[in-house]
Image (cartoon, grey):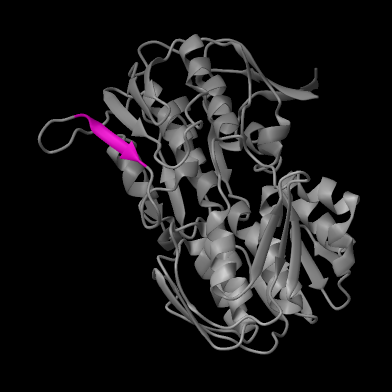
Amino acid sequence: MMEFEVVGGHRLRGDITPQGAKNEALQILCAVMMTPERVVIENIPEIVDCLQLIDLLGRLGVEVEKLGTGKYAFRAANIDVEYMKTEDYRRRASKLRGSVMLLGPMLGRFGVGYMPKPGGDKIGRRRLDTHFIGFEKLGARFNFDTGSSFFTVEGRDMRGAYILLDEASVTGTANVVMAAVLTPGFTTIYNAACEPYLQQLCKMLNRMGAKISGIGSNLLTIEGVERLGGTEHRMLPDMIEVGSFIGMAALTRSEITIKDVSYPDLGIIPEQFRRMGIHFEQRGDDIYIPEQEQYTIESFIDGSIMTIADAPWPGLTPDLLSIFLVVATQAKGAVLIHQKMFESRLFFVDKLIDMGAQIILCDPHRATVIGHGHSVRLRATTMSSPDIRAGVALLLAAMSAKGVSRIQNVEQIDRGYQNIDLRLNALGAEIRRVTE
């Protein structure tokens, strides 16, 4: 087991480039299964979750060729469908929540898919109903073996259908889109997720020969095609990393430039950080953040306390609420953080309270933060990373704290952030990876 030893209090300076988007990569990697032709993908983040999925694709029979850092070629010409029934597949896929998005490609191309109950972050209920209801609307038959926790979906005679999703699930929308693209007839998906990463998937599929319209809206129309061809695709930069670095600069009172952020795809994220009082400039496709001794949280027009809440796109992504919460601990003023989508994602605040943060956990979804205004620094402590996003939030807290902190279970952080310690050390941080 590895842990980070973090010496807090260092001010950072320099340029940093965000990695490719993890949440896009998991969708795009699954989509290579939809064609027997060559697909080349660039800017893949070489993080644990992506590397495990690439390994799983290889075991399914996909030819995988590494062309360079973050650049791979895939050819899914000879897929071993029977491997999905094996104990080895069950063991590997169950560790990776993103593997659930293999079902849509398998169902569309081969008419059948198998999936163990997936793992991933323990951040509350993350139901899969949206995926399977969508498949059933297309005419697939779904079975879940409660004893083995194994899903089977069969749909060799599927037809296009009207589908009203019960929630705007990103992975649910992606899975249903990938199944519908190779399903005869017209499929309409209403209340579809429209995040940039889902848009990227749809654009890639259209380049492969799919016929998807309405991209970027919550109403997608798909005309099924018989087969898809090869293509090349480049991942967007990871908006969660961009937001994490903005928060890091404010917490550590540092001057940094975040390079190549694909600013138009950040949506509401920059403005939400402005509401926290953080100053920055857009310089071309870069974000420049100057040293700032203090940042003051805005209040609403009527003077009431600011609320930062997650929402489906174009609202604020829930993956950044942990960062906003930590940033608020050193702001001047108060804010209510409202995590609507997951009921366990705020439970890491007890670790911040141990560090001296003033936080009231109102319930599993809401926390009120009263900022120190940098007048009182957080205290160093030993803590454990409960999930990817909370883990990075705790890392940022440790970087701003007084003393030496230790963060255990950094394997969780490695699942979503590539060489985060080395990249931050290059800016002047002092993070050491040690064996427990």
Q: Position of residue 377 (x, y in %)?
A: 44, 12
Q: Relative to the observer, which residue lies in front, 373 or 239?
A: 239
User: Is 4 contained in the magenta span?
Assistant: no
Q: Which residues make up the magenta segment? A: 305-309
Residue 261 shows in this picture: yes
Relative side of 133 to 91, left or right: left
- Is 16 located above or below residue 196 in the figure? above
Q: Relative to the observer, which residue lies in front, 232 or 121?
A: 121
Kindly identify the residue that appears in the image at 37 percent across and 57 percent down: 314
Q: Position of residue 154 (x, y in %)?
A: 71, 70
Q: Position of residue 309 (x, y in %)?
A: 34, 40
- Is 373 located above or below residue 103 in the figure? above
Q: Position of residue 279 (x, y in %)?
A: 33, 39
Task: Using the rendered view, name the quadrant where residue 305 is placed.
Answer: top left
- Is 130 located above or below residue 203 in the figure? above
Screen quadrant of the C terminus: top right
Relative side of 181 to 156, left or right: left
Q: Relative to the observer, which residue lies in front, 204 or 222?
A: 222
User: Is 308 contained in the magenta span?
Assistant: yes
Please, which residue is most extreme toward the left here? 302
Kindly identify the residue that appears in the image at 43 percent across and 46 percent down: 288
Kindly identify the residue that appears in the image at 70 percent across and 29 percent down: 410
Kindly identify the residue that appears in the image at 45 percent across and 10 percent down: 356
